[in-house]
Image (cartoon, helix red, strand yellow):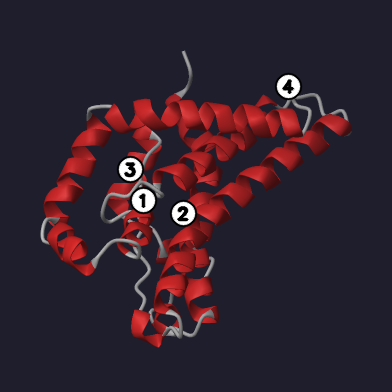
Amino acid sequence: MENPLISLLIKVPGIVLGITFHEFAHGAVAYLLGDSTPKKEGRLTLNPLSHVDIVGLIMLFFMNFGWAKPVHTNPSNFKNRKLATTLVALAGSVANILIAVFLTALLRILFLVNLDLNSYYLVYDIIHYGVMINIVLGIFNLLPIPPLDGSKILFNFIPPRSYFKIIRYEYILQIVLLLLLFTGIIPSLINPLVDYSMKFLYSLFQLI
């Protein structure tokens, strides 16, 4: 039986990397596009404590799905509001995918230097989980359900009338999102995409 403490420790690096760079990317892109709100609120930092949402963190540890504190932006500060808000929303998932690529490359390097992963199995498990959880975060956050990033992208491409209809039920949709997570519906939809993405990355770096 796997030691629960070891299992927890394996997850920590990947989760911390994932949520920290995801939220930092949102703030950094917003700042580069002219909005200083994230900087004023202390979100242009790689300190994980500035980004952690307790409920979302617990979900990540026990369900492999979760979230961090949202980065607030002021769209009126953007020159091209629609383009900028779309890029800011995409930035988090792009950061997660880049981390997954980096970790896969790191794993490849460890193989090339002939690191005995049977002896250093924890290293492999930590990196492998880091790849997986960052792909999960990248895909999950693009779902078009409030408050996920995908909904912010969707709102940029629907008529204002439809937007206001949806936003009226934002809190209900958040409850629906939690129910879809707890009932396993979202994991059942996303997991095949995660598996395919991992196989693609591992094939790309000749790990399988």
Distance Cα–Cα, label 3 vs label 1? 9 Å
Q: Which numbered mark, 3 or 1, is in the foreground of this view?
A: 1
Q: Are marks 2 and 3 in contact (CB under 8 Å)?
A: no
- Amino acid type, callout 2: Ile
Please tell me which of labels 2 and 3 falls first in the chain.
2
Q: Residues within 10 Å of mark 4 (few under 14, many from 20)?
A: few
Specify whether residue 88 is in view.
Answer: yes
Q: Is residue 98 above or below residue 161?
A: above
The residue located at (69%, 30%) in the rendering is: 202
Q: Is residue 178 left or right of residue 94?
A: left
Left or right side of 103 for 174:
left
Q: Earlier in the sequence, mark 1 or mark 4?
A: 1
Q: Position of residue 117 (x, y in %)?
A: 75, 24
Q: CA distance from mark 4 to mark 2?
A: 28 Å
Residue that numbered label 3 is attached to = 58
Q: Which amino acid type corresponds to the residue marked 3 in the rendered image?
A: Ile
- Lower sequence index among marks 3 and 1: 3
Residue 118: x %, y % from top left: 73, 19
Q: Residue at x 41, y 62 (%)?
A: 51
- Please provide percent x and percent y for residue 161: 17, 66
Instruction: Give the camera-side residue of 72 and 154.
Output: 154
Residue picked out by circle 1: 67
